[in-house]
């Protein structure tokens, strides 16, 4: 008999683990209460990138004269944008459902809670109670936007991220609280839709976890676009004014008025309804579930992947975790098996210009006292960037001065999310800068700057 594998949560990690385990011979059941493909992915990530793409098209059309085209004045249509986003989500969910169905994976719509280490009870969306037993379990229940006690969310004027795809109306003046990855993406998104935007920055610069030079490049672009930055200000309350707008109060005495407020202040793991204590699964003080390098919790047959694992909250990481979980469940880790190295995960920020990075950062290397060769090439020297009319940004590559092995890199500029893949492959495979330099790349292409930065 095959392994009975129960996957609780049908996001990127759960779908990947279920698909791979089924292909390897497991009997798989997936429990998902919302959308197959993941709420954080299909209700946050994908819609935000779809809106950013629409905003990018608006910005591109408004700059048509730079390309020798008569000026165009495009206008966003919220209902059309909403229909487009719904169509994309429906297509992706249907693709996930068809994939699992073709592999014999059973999908149960509902919410699961553990009865003991080897059984879960599922309350289906139809109200039925179903009991499932398994030899192995994967917890991949994801996360949700964090809402502080001081934030009166109403879904109209004060919004979480999931209420903004699209919002009820394009804000006249949007106040964004939170200057991490999600926050800056919202700043970019809504300024391209014509909103005036103010950003509350709790520290002295945006993107505190990123390379300072990268953050500075985006800050400069924001300021050039008339985005107002409130640095060193931490929001502590949101009031409604007499005209129906919002006023965000900060702990330094400043207040920021706008028509709408959007919160981008992190996320929380979805663990409360799982009754983890019945299975003996331990969480940390934040509610995340610690794991070993096989994504195994403190209970040897219960795995954890995706946002709830407390690792990098990236769909790409969740997918890879799901793949590794399936291999371990089916015993394939006994052969050649590469463990996940979260320090080598590539990430991107879909602003304009785009930002992407992977591996060791320059500031991190400096803090560690590590010797590093840093080379940087601006896109202003790249023919394709000039042809495309957007020569902003640069490519930076970090390598070991003794061996030439590529250790990391950052990109600011057009198509950064795609270009970082080359550096990510080099970092993962321990390639040398010479391997990039000696590659025969297309001309003219943005990727040529990679070889120049590696040279």
Image: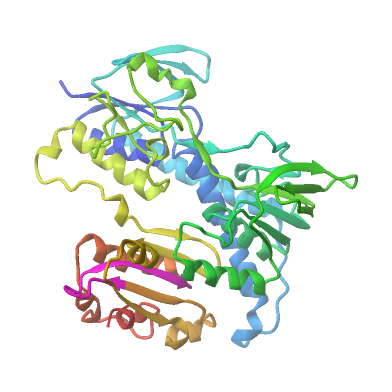
Marker count (numbered): 0
Name the side, left or right, on which 333 lies relative to 108: left
Q: State the image quarter where residue 183 is shown.
A: bottom right
Name the side, left or right, on which 19 lies relative to 242: left
Question: Quick one: which residue is furthest to the right in this view?
Answer: 242
| 401 relative to 94, above or below | below
Residue 28 is covered by the magenta coloring: no
The percent position of residue 159, horizontal first and vertical second, equals 68, 43
Which portion, as a residue range, is magenta? 398-413
The percent position of residue 343, horizontal first and vertical second, equals 31, 54
The percent position of residue 33, horizontal first and vertical second, equals 49, 27
At x 38%, y 16%, the residue is 277
At x 82%, y 48%, the residue is 245
| 279 relative to 38, above or below | above
Which quarter of the image is occupied by the N terminus? Answer: top left
Q: State the image quarter where residue 16 is shown.
A: top left
Return the residue nearer the eye: 226 or 193. Answer: 226
Return the residue nearer the eye: 268 or 253. Answer: 253
Which quarter of the image is occupied by the C terminus? Answer: bottom left
| 35 relative to 257, above or below | above
Question: Quick one: which residue is furthest to the left in this view?
Answer: 335
Overall secondary structure of the magenta section: strand
| 169 relative to 306, above or below | below
Q: State the image quarter where residue 58 is shown.
A: bottom right
Return the residue nearer the eye: 246 or 4. Answer: 246
Name the side, left or right, on which 174 lies relative to 449: right
Residue 407 is covered by the magenta coloring: yes
> How is this picture coloured?
rainbow
The percent position of residue 279, horizontal first and vertical second, equals 33, 17
At x 23%, y 71%, the residue is 400
């Amino acid at each position: 008999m095959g392994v009975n594998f129960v996957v609780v949560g049908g996001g990127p990690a759960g779908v990947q683990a279920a698909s791979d385990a089924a292909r390897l011979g497991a009997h798989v059941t997936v429990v998902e209460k919302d959308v197959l493909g993941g709420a954080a992915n299909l209700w946050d990530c994908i819609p935000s990138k779809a809106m950013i793409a629409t905003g990018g098209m608006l910005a591109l059309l408004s700059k048509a004269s730079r390309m020798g085209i008569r000026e165009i004045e495009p206008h966003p249509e919220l209902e059309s944008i909403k229909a487009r986003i719904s169509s994309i989500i429906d297509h992706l969910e249907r693709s996930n459902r068809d994939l699992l169905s073709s592999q014999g994976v059973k999908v149960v719509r509902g919410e699961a809670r553990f009865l003991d280490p080897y059984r879960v009870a599922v309350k289906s969306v139809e109200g039925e109670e179903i009991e499932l037993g398994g030899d192995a379990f994967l917890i991949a229940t994801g996360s949700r936007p964090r809402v502080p006690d001081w934030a009166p969310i109403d879904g109209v004027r004060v919004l979480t991220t999931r209420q903004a795809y699209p919002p009820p109306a394009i804000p006249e003046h949007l106040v964004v609280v939170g200057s991490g990855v999600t926050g800056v993406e919202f700043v970019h998104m809504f300024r391209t839709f014509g909103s005036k935007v103010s950003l509350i920055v709790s520290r002295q610069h945006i993107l505190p976890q990123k390379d300072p030079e990268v953050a500075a490049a985006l800050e400069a672009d924001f300021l050039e676009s008339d985005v107002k930055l409130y640095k060193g200000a931490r929001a502590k309350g949101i009031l409604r004014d007499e005209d129906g707008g919002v006023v965000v109060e900060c702990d330094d005495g400043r207040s920021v008025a706008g028509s709408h407020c959007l919160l981008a202040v992190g996320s929380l793991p979805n663990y409360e309804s799982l009754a983890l204590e019945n299975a003996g699964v331990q969480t940390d003080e934040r509610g995340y579930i610690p794991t070993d390098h096989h994504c195994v919790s403190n209970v040897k047959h219960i795995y954890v992947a995706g946002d709830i694992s407390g690792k990098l909250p990236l769909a790409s990481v969740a997918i890879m975790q799901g793949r590794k979980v399936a291999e371990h469940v089916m015993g394939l880790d006994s052969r050649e098996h590469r463990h996940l190295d979260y320090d080598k995960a590539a990430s991107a920020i879909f602003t304009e210009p785009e930002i992407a990075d992977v591996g060791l950062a320059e500031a991190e290397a400096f803090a560690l006292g590590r010797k590093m060769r840093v080379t940087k090439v601006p896109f202003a020297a790249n023919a394709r960037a000039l042809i495309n009319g957007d020569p902003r940004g640069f490519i930076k590559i970090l390598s070991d001065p003794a061996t030439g092995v590529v250790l990391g890199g950052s990109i600011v500029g057009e198509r950064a999310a795609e270009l970082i893949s080359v550096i990510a492959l080099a970092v993962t495979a321990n390639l040398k800068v010479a391997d990039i330099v000696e590659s025969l790349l297309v001309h003219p292409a943005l990727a040529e700057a990679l070889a120049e930065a590696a040279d």
